[in-house]
Image: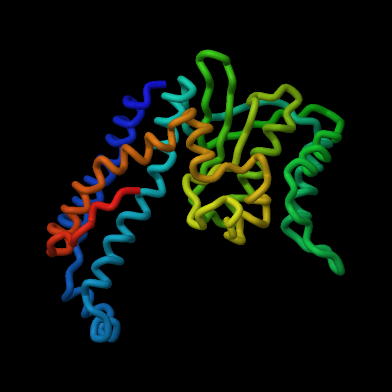
């Protein structure tokens, strides 16, 4: 893996995103104080315009960046494994008994039986139970968010990549996909993971977003990767540092532009603090 090439590709992706964001907030959809006052006169009377100008930028930054994670993961996969693809379909067969047990496990995680506590997620116990299912082979297809394949060893890995605070429905769908991949009679991947690009809670043992915690033990399940665990897995050793270096090298340029061109103020001292 060439970390310098990976870093350059990551920078190119982030620069393209930031250029689009800057064009939107400066040209296509700028913050117009008069429009803000007309739409929210009470808020505008009580709170300085600069606060809402900041939130205006944030909304137009966070949403497109949510879609960029898959592009960045794909870059890491191509440099780390040798091949990567988005929305990749894996097809195999699963015994109907295993499919029934997958539905059973998901239902128990979602619904509480009267007089009993809701089932707590435990990947190893659930998978072992599912793999005991027998019966007729049923064709099954799974579309994974990110697929990676090693050109050297032939190892194949699938990732369900979601935002750091995923909702319950999308987490359930991802868990069902992972269980089906592992339940295939002739496995199409060596490993499959539920992955988050970064951890808003800091350490993995502190992750505490309730919705995915219904479906996975986010702190302990081996099928869960968060932050640097994911980047090192999809891109190889050193990927997370390459990602941080890529961002740090271009961050000051965009911060200066945001301060001067969007906020209309000079950057404060120590504005260019690195990740």
Residue drawn at (56%, 36%), measured in percent from left and top? 159
**Colouring method of the image:** rainbow
Which image quadrant for residue 245? top left
- Looking at the image, residue 264 lies above or below residue 95: below
- Rendered location of residue 137, percent (x, y): 79, 27
- Looking at the image, residue 34 lies above or below residue 6: below
Residue drawn at (54%, 54%), measured in percent from left and top? 166
- Rendered location of residue 273, percent (x, y): 28, 52
- Looking at the image, residue 133 lies above or below residue 79: below
Q: Is residue 218 left or right of residue 105?
A: left
- Looking at the image, residue 36 lies above or below residue 110: below
Q: Is residue 58 left or right of residue 87?
A: left
Quarter of the image where the N terminus is located: top left
Front-most of 10 and 96?
10
- Rendered location of residue 153, percent (x, y): 57, 15
Q: Is residue 147 left or right of residue 18?
A: right
- Rendered location of residue 134, percent (x, y): 86, 31
Spot the residue most to the front: 270
Spot the residue most to the top: 152
Residue drawn at (21%, 75%), measured in percent from left and top? 49
Which image quadrant for residue 185? top right
Residue drawn at (87%, 69%), measured in percent from left and top? 115
Front-most of 251 and 162?
251
How many discs appear?
Answer: 0
């Amino acid at each position: 893996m060439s970390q310098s090439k990976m870093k350059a590709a990551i920078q190119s992706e982030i620069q393209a995103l930031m250029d689009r964001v800057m064009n939107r907030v400066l040209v296509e959809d700028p913050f117009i104080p008069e429009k803000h006052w007309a739409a929210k006169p009470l808020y505008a009377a009580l709170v300085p315009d600069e606060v809402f100008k900041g939130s205006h930028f944030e909304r137009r930054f966070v949403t497109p960046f949510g879609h960029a994670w898959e592009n960045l993961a794909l870059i890491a996969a191509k440099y780390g494994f040798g091949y990567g693809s988005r929305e990749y379909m894996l097809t195999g067969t699963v015994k109907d008994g295993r499919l029934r047990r997958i539905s059973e496990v998901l239902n128990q995680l979602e619904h509480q039986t009267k007089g009993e506590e809701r089932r707590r997620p435990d990947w190893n116990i659930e998978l072992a139970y599912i793999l005991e299912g027998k019966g007729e082979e049923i064709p099954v297809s799974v579309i994974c968010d990110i697929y990676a394949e090693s050109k050297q060893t032939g190892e194949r890995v699938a990732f369900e990549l979601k935002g750091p605070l995923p909702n319950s429905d999308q987490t359930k769908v991802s868990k069902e996909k992972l269980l089906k991949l592992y339940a295939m009679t002739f496995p199409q991947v060596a490993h499959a993971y539920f992955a988050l690009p970064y951890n808003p809670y800091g350490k993995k043992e502190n992750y505490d977003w309730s919705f995915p915690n219904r479906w996975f033990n986010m702190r302990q399940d081996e099928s869960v990767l968060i932050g640097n665990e994911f980047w090192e897995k999809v891109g190889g050793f050193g990927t997370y540092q390459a990602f941080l270096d890529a961002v740090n090298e271009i961050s000051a340029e965009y911060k200066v532009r945001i301060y001067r061109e969007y906020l209309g103020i000079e950057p404060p001292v120590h504005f260019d603090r690195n990740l």
